[in-house]
Image: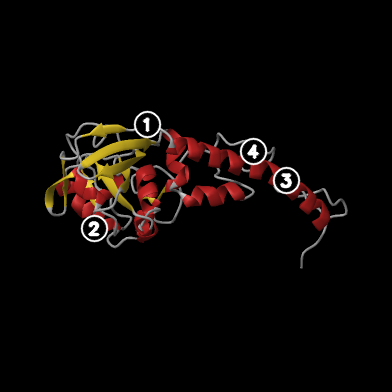
Amino acid sequence: MTTTPNDPGAAPRGRPPVVDPATWQAARDELLVREKAHTREGDAIAAARRRLPMVEFDPAVEVVGPHGPVPFLDLFEGRDELVVYKHMWHDGAPHQGQCEGCTTTAWHVRDAVYLNARGVSFAVLTTGRWEEVAPYVAFMGYAQPWYSVRGAAEPVGGAMGYLACFLREGDRAFLTYSTTGRGNERVNGSLGLLDMTPYGRGEAWEDTPEGWPRGREACWYWRSDAGGTADWGPTSRPVPQWTRPGAHPVETLGRRGPGH
């Protein structure tokens, strides 16, 4: 049975105050004004993004996929637009040693059927050697296409850890947009849902009310041990990997810090 405190504004430490439905609705409506303004600003930014200039590059540069070297133009799969995620790679590391942040981003795009329906292709690029990348992709069960861009220059290769968009016109290709830093969050729907919850992402940078559980470093819960405890210990791995065949806690790994 739920009990209501005598003081409707009172609540256990670390919890929102308890109020009546009308008071809650008034506060919710006040926040909605800000949310709508945020949405409209996002629409305006997207409109500006569509008006950015673009950079032409050589689409004949070869990348390596499951069928060997292919020209970058093949990644469009006959469509006019292409979105890629550039997945960081640690040479020689076991599956559990790959980047927890990039693993999470790629996991949130398990397939691209809705992008394809809109005429947009999707691929994951990485600087890893294909002979290392292929078993990792199989282990994770990824359905989207992966390619090694090792040795390729920007915008095909180069720095990893971000999203990029390309446009094709016949046999010509252009870079139209790329993200920086937290721009990758657009892919990770889990972060958007966590932002709706009382405790948020549980990260130290967040503006958290007094008495709330204290946050930790960014991405801290994206790596865990077999019991689901978030840590950076020798048996930890990116959390999606615990759902994959062959993942078991006896495997060890040299300790890595956040972001590595």
Could you tell me which secondary element the residue under label 2 belongs to? Answer: helix
Q: Quadrant of the C terminus?
A: top left
Earlier in the chain: of badge 3 and badge 2, it is 3
Which residue, given by chain and number where applicable, does mark 2 sit on? Answer: 138
C-alpha distance separating marks 1 and 2:
37 Å
For label 2, the crowd category at 10 Å Cα-Cα, with few meaning under 14, some 14 to 19 and many 20 or more, is few
For label 1, the crowd category at 10 Å Cα-Cα, with few meaning under 14, some 14 to 19 and many 20 or more, is few
In percent of width and height, residue 68 lies at 11, 50
Mark 2 and mark 4 in contact (Cβ < 8 Å)?
no
Q: Amino acid at mark 4?
A: Thr
Q: Nearer the viewer, mark 3 or mark 2?
A: 2
Nearest the viewer among 137 and 70 is: 70
Asked whether, in this view, residue 152 is left or right of residue 3, the answer is: left
Which residue, given by chain and number where applicable, does mark 1 sit on? Answer: 53
C-alpha distance separating marks 1 and 4:
39 Å
Mark 4 and mark 1 in contact (Cβ < 8 Å)?
no
Which residue, given by chain and number where applicable, does mark 3 sit on? Answer: 13
Which residue, given by chain and number where applicable, does mark 4 sit on? Answer: 208
C-alpha distance separating marks 4 and 3:
13 Å
In the rendered image, is residue 99 in sight? yes
In percent of width and height, residue 249 lies at 33, 55
Earlier in the chain: of badge 1 and badge 2, it is 1
Could you tell me which secondary element the residue under label 3 belongs to? Answer: loop
Q: Amino acid at mark 2?
A: Ala
